[in-house]
Amino acid sequence: MTELHYNLIMSHIRDISSQASLLFSSDADEGLYVEDCCQANSLETGVTDTFSIGENKTPEQVLKSIFGYDSFRPLQKEVIANVLDGRDTLAVMPTGGGKSLCYQIPALLLPGLTVVVSPLIALMQDQVSQLEAWGIPAVFLNSSLEWGEYVQKMNLIRQGKVKLLYVSPEGLGTSRIQDILHSEKVELSCITIDEAHCVSEWGHDFRPDYMEIACIREQFPSAVCLALTATATKQVQGDIVKHLRLENPAVLVASFNRPNLFLDVRKKSNPFEQTQNFLLEHKGESGIIYCFSRRQVDELTEKLAHKNFSVLNYHAGLSDDERSQHQKLFIQDKVDVMVATLAFGMGINKPNVRFVLHYDMPKSIEQYYQEIGRAGRDGLPATALLLYSYGDLHKIRYFFEDSADPQKAEKLLQGMVSYAEAKTCRRQQLLSYFGEPYMEASGDKDCCCDICSRGGIKNSDVTLPFQKYLSCIARTRQRFGAAYVIDVLLGSKNKRIIENGDDQLSTWGIGRELSKQDWMELNSCLIASGYIEKCGDYGTLAITELGLDALKNRKPVFLPVEFSGKKASPVISFPKKKTKTADDIANDDEALRIADSLRSWRRKVADEMNVPPYVIFGDKTLYDIASRKPTALPQLMDCYGIGEAKAQRFWKDILRIVKGE
C-alpha cells in the first residue's frame, strides 16, 4: 500500500465521520446501543477498488503491516491457520484474547466475502469503525441505517467491494440479506458466528435466532465456518458444534486465565460505602458497576453523582436516545463510570476499562466471567470486585419460577455461590469451573486474588458455633435446610417454627451472637469440610460421621471462616505488573509529558472523527510511544499497535508531540 492510498482512506473517513449519528435498533435485545462512528459509505468513492494487502502475504505480515502487532496472542495463529485451510473451527477464547483478529486476518487473505454474525449492533458498528481506521473495507447492515445508506451498502457488497459484512442473526435470515449473498459477484468465503454460546440453552445468554444459522450456512457449503465465544463449558461446546452443524471441526480452547485481572470478593456490609471507597482508589479510571435491577441502578447512580463521581446509568427503562447518549459518553471517555444492568456491555470493545464492580451477585459463573472480561481488554492491570450477600440469592431465586428450567438455573447459581465463598485461590476456583488447571506463574501468587494477596484465609477456632449449629440440626430432626436451622438459632418466631414447636427447643435463640450471614458462612464451610451435607432436592441438612464424631467427643474445630464481626480488610490495591502502565513511566518526566500530550491530542482527533479515543490507539500504545520516544517513522512503526495506515495518517503529529514541538 502506498502513502497516497492510506491518506485517501483516512481523509475520506474523516469527511464522512462528521455526519455520523446515534441510532438505536431493535435487531437484538434491550442491551443494544449504537454509535454510528464511521459509516462505510466511504467505500463508494472507489477506495475498495484500490484496497490490497499485497500478494502472498502471510498472516504474520498482515498482523504487523495492517494492525501493528508484532506477535499473535495465544491460539490466534492456530485458529487463523484452520480457517485459511477451510476447516470449520470452534474457538473458545477469553474476552480480550483477540477473537476479532481470528476472522479479520483470514477475511483479508481469503478471496471473497466474510460474513460476521453478531448479536449486537454495538459490536457491529464499533468493529466497522475500527476496521475503517485500519483502511479495511467493511460494512454492517441493520435497521439503524436510513434506507438510502442501506441500499448503498448493499450495492457495494454486490459489486464485490466489501471484505467484511456484519449482520445480526435475525438479519441473516431475511430475504434481503439472502438475495445479496446469492448475488453473482458475491463469493462467500467465511461465515463467522460471534458469541456462539448464544446457540446453547446451557449458555448464559441463549438466543433462539442463533438456532437458524445452520440452515443458512447449508446454502453455502464451500464457505468455512468459524464459531467464537469467550465462555463455553464442555456441554456448551458440544451444543455449539451440534446446533451450528460444524463439519469435523477443530475445537480450540484457549486458557481462561486473565493474569492481568485481579479477582476480589467482599461480603456486603455497607455496599454504598464499599463502592465509594473503591471508586476513590480508582479515581479517574474507566469502569462498569453492575446492579441487579433498574431501580438499584438509578438509586446508586444518583448517590454517586451526589458524591461528585463521574457516573451515568444504563438500563432498558431509559429511552433509546438516553441509552445511546450515555453509552457514547462512556466509550468516548467523557464519563468515567457506567452503572448498569446486565443489558450493558456485551460486544463493547472499549479496551481501557480498568474495573468491573458487581454490586450484586451474578446468576452464574458464565455471566460473571463474561462481565468481568470487559475489564482490562488492553492487557493492562484491571480489577474485578464482587460484593455479595445471601440476600442476593433470594432476589435471583425469585425469578426462577419463570425460568424454563429452574433446576438448571439453581445449579448455575450454586456454581457462583461456591466461587464467592471460596477459601482458596479464586483464580484456581474460576479456572476449575471451566475444566482448566491453574498453572501458577512465577511471582503470580501474590497478585492473583484477594485471598492469595492476604496470604490465604487463616483457620479460626469455631468450636462453640460448630457445636451450636450441629446440635440445632440434630434437634430439628435433620429435616430442614440452612435457612430454617439458622432462624431457630436466632430465635425467630415465624409461623412455621412455632407450628413445629421448635421455639421450645434448647437451641432456640442460642445463636444471636452471630448474624444470619455469619451462620450462612459457617454452614458453607462445614459443608466444604465434610461435617455436614445437603440431602435431597430441598437441601435438607444432615450430619456426617465426621460431624457426629467431632460433636460427641467435643473435638476442637478450626475452619477458614471470616465472621462479619471482625474488622473488614480494606480493598486491596492491584499489585504492580510488568506491563507498561502510567506507573512504569512515573519517574520519567519526559515520558509523562509525552503521555499527557498524546492523551489530549488523541481526544481532540477522536472528537473530530466522531469515534472513541481507542479507535485512534489504545492506552497500551500510548504508554509504549511515551516510553520508546520515537523520532522517526520507522521507529514509530515499532511501537505496539501502530500499523501502516495509522502510521501514515498520524506520524507527523505524534513525532511532533514526542519532540515537544
Image: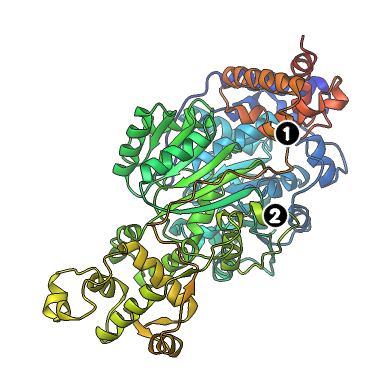
Residue at 60% from the left image edge and 47% from the top image edge = 116
Residue at 49% from the left image edge and 73% from the top image edge = 558
Amino acid bearing label 1: Asp
- In this view of the protein, which residue sits in the foreground, 283 or 411? 283
For the question of whether residue 539 can be seen, the reply is no
Q: How is the image coloured?
A: rainbow
Residue at 50% from the left image edge and 49% from the top image edge = 385
Tag 2 residue: 444
Q: Which element type, helix, strand or loop, lies under badge 2?
A: loop
x%, y% of residue 6?
76, 24
Horizontal side of 44 relative to 210 (left or right) equals right
- Outermost top residue: 661
x%, y% of residue 471?
31, 82
- In this view of the protein, which residue sits in the foreground, 550 or 196? 550
Q: Which mark is residue 584?
A: 1
Q: Is residue 608 above or below residue 416?
A: above
x%, y% of residue 329?
48, 27
The quadrant where residue 215 appears: bottom right
